[in-house]
Image (cartoon, helix red, strand yellow):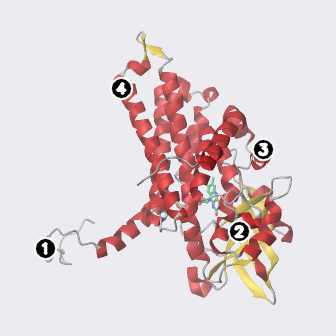
Amino acid sequence: MVDYNLLPYQKELQDKAVAFTKEHITPYAVELDKADEIPMDLLQKAYEAGLMNLHVPKEAGGPGYNLLDETFVSEATGYGDAGCATSIMCNNLAFAPLMVDATIEQLQKYIQPLITGEKVKLGAFALTERNSGSDAGATTTMAEKQGDEWIINGRKCWITNAAKADLFTVFAQTDPKLGYKGIAVFMVPKDRGVEIGHIENKIGQRASNQAEVIFENVHIPEDCLVGEVGKGFHNAMKTLDKTRAGIAAIAAGVCQRCVDEASRFSITRKSFGSKIAKFQGIGFMLADMQGRALTAQQTTRYAAWLADNNMRNSTESAIAKVVASDNAMQNATDAIQIMGGYGYAEEYGMGVIFRGAKLLQIYEGTNQINRLVIMGNLKKRAKTLNTGFKLNYEGIDAPDHTWAPQ
Ligand SMILES: Cc1cc2nc3c(=O)[nH]c(=O)nc-3n(C[C@H](O)[C@H](O)[C@H](O)COP(=O)(O)OP(=O)(O)OC[C@H]3O[C@@H](n4cnc5c(N)ncnc54)[C@H](O)[C@@H]3O)c2cc1C
């Protein structure tokens, strides 16, 4: 039996995130986007409200929420502004690889001090490099063991919240001969000598900030290694299976915001003497938009629920990411269409939503890469399928010498 009711604590968390968004994000989204920097005041407020570091276990000073709980917060904040939501959820992403493989002692030593003080502290997830984006296994940042230390050398780019981060979760190569099987994950404290380089200049989600991160002979103690050497790529894939639901949740929030702004507009704006909501051409668009918002939300919550119940969710989290972000982009496009010139005018704020939605299709694995994940899992499944339908496929393989498109 499926129960769609939220538990009382989940409803409380969701209500808190919705109220926070209404008070601190939605009214300031355009301003924060223009400021184009990490919104530290907002993050301090989100931290004090208990909307950050959600999945850190209670034994390490966190609130111990699960992934489904996290989606309620990201959906609510994403409704206000995808950039602010990205900044707020970034600690969840930064610490996610540690939830996969770190020991409780490591969390208590390196994470607890960051999440229990008065001031908000930031973590950053450092996987991407200039020549290793989608192809995450091509990481060239090096980690070399010397005595009881690891020495990190290399550069990461596009790292969210990096400019103000105190701890970096870094994916680095320990033995280039092994390819992706040589990668390991490390916790690298900023004060060990990490430098910040180029700040990326983006067209959207400017209330979140990305920077290049430079490691030049950065020495870290051996207990900064997370999990086993050689298991870093596996960790990254397991991490993304979890965190993609977080991005999908932001996208679900964007989807619903577009429906709400466009439908509010449609019952006010008149054309040819009637409210435009009366025109079926507009109503059908709004109906499709609401369908997309619901699909985004439900695929997201299902992907998170699977992970929380220790079920493999690689296909479902990739589907949630693709469906929710494609739907967000389509809804943002349609909302602007419904709002006509007012949708396109900078001062009405839809531009921030539209440009913010685009990024949802790119980070945490582009939607092409997520489709590859789905396709790979489908191919594996097809080999084991017996549908009961008898069809003889033998002899339909095209011989090698037949014509093929050039
Ligand atoms: C705003 C922002 C925030 C980010 N935050 C972080 C962060 O905090 N930490 C972090 O580590 N990274 C972060 N990233 C990096 C992000 O994850 C990468 O940008 C993304 O994985 C794509 O890599 P790329 O940009 O190098 O594109 P590329 O990998 O060069 O891809 C270019 C194009 O080719 C397509 N493509 C590539 N390979 C294939 C294939 N096999 N089949 C089909 N199509 C393919 C891609 O889908 C894309 O359309 C962020 C990026 C942005 C823009």
Tell me where residue 352 sits by quadrant.
Answer: top right
Task: Write the residue at 73% across / 60% down.
Answer: 62
Mark sitting earlier along the chain (1/2): 2
Compared to 242, does 217 lie above or below?
below
Residue neighbourhood size for the residue with mark 4, other residues' Cα within 10 Å, grouped as few (<14), some (14–19), many (≥20) = few
Residue at the far bottom: name it: 147
Q: CA distance from mark 2 to mark 4?
A: 49 Å
Q: State the CA–CA distance, disc 1 to disc 3.
A: 64 Å
Image quadrant of residue 383?
bottom left
**Of the image marks 4 and 1, the number of the one nearer the N terminus:** 4
Q: Does any atom of ligand 1 lie closer than 8 Å to the CB of label 3?
A: no
Q: Earlier in the sequence, mark 1 or mark 3?
A: 3
Question: Contact (CB < 8 A) between labels 1 and 3?
Answer: no
Q: Is residue 258 left or right of residue 193?
A: left
Mark 1 burial class by Cα count in 10 Å: few <14, some 14-19, many 20+: few
Residue closer to the observer: 23 or 134: 23
Q: Which residue is mark 4?
A: 281
